[in-house]
Amino acid sequence: MNIVVIVPAAGSGSRFGGQIPKQFLPLAGKPVLQHVVERFLSEEWVSRVIVPVSQDMLASMSRSSGENVVWVAGGETRQQSVIRGLAEAGDAELIAVHDAARPLISAQVFRSVVEAARATGAALPVLPVADTIHVMNDDWTIAKTLDRSRLGAAQTPQCFRADLLREILDRAVREGIDGTDEAGLAVRFGHRVQAVPGDPRNIKITLPEDLEVAESYLRQWGPRS
Ligand code: C5P
């Protein structure tokens, strides 16, 4: 199998606070992003990892490149960064897109998402939602309450047949849509997207305390299964 992984990492990480984007903060001795890149390179199905980063990070990153890691300049939004990465994906059969700030990818989640995408065209890991989710009005009154039993929180890696991912991103550009993930775009354009069970440890580093949680998971984890 020939899978290319795109890791959009060109965000400024403003929700985290501080100067350094969250994907470059140290976790157990190396940047979060380095954990992500090395993790995918250790999967035999992965031929290349493409990392869109901000223009000012590009020069220093390119110097540390291995032959299977390609650094490219990201775009204005996450989606535009993925599109820039896609241009370097060559003839991959499947393309996975993974958040730069999720360093804890289990082999189990990766393989199940890849196998589901191979069978159906598009797949992502999801976690059942523990909290009740309300849709809010602008004035913070509650507009409606969603049926929690049918909600799933999206994780990454999200995996697609390469032709399908190209098609949905081309269409999103044509129609002026900027989505927060590719699975949502695929659904919006009428494609079947298969969910597989996610992993609660596959957290997105968003707040400073998430780094401590991720570090303790890494310590417990050992060889990832
Ligand atoms: O902000 P959020 O966590 O949803 O961003 C998701 C991912 O998209 C992050 O890994 C971030 O670095 C990346 N991103 C990007 N280019 C942008 C904005 C965000 O690659 N212009």
Image: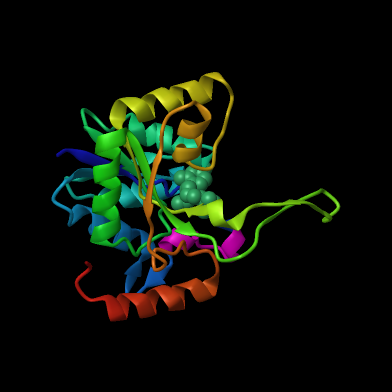
One can see residue 189 in this view: yes
Residue that lies at the very extreme toward the top in this rendered image: 174
Residue at image point 45% right, 73% down: 211
Q: Nearer the viewer, residue 128 or 149?
A: 149
Q: Quadrant of residue 219?
A: bottom left
Residue 85 pos. (x, y %) = 36, 36
Q: Nearer the viewer, residue 89 or 138?
A: 138
Query: Is residue 39 rendered to the left or right of residue 187?
Result: left
Residue at image point 50% right, 26% down: 189
> Bounds of the magenta span?
15-24
One can see residue 64 in this view: no
Residue 75 pos. (x, y %) = 48, 37
Residue at image point 27% right, 53% down: 110
Residue 146 pos. (x, y %) = 66, 52
In the rendered view of the protein, which quadrant contains the N terminus?
A: top left
Q: Judge whether residue 52 is colored magenta.
A: no
Residue at image point 13% right, 50% down: 44
The answer to whether residue 90 is above or below residue 222 is above
Query: Is residue 218 rendered to the left or right of residue 146?
Result: left
Q: Quadrant of residue 28?
A: bottom left
In the rendered view of the protein, which quadrant contains the C terminus?
A: bottom left
Residue 205 pos. (x, y %) = 47, 64
The answer to whether residue 167 is above or below residue 40 is above
Q: Nearer the viewer, residue 200 or 105?
A: 200
The answer to whether residue 42 is above or below residue 124 is below
Query: Is residue 194 rendered to the left or right of residue 18?
Result: left
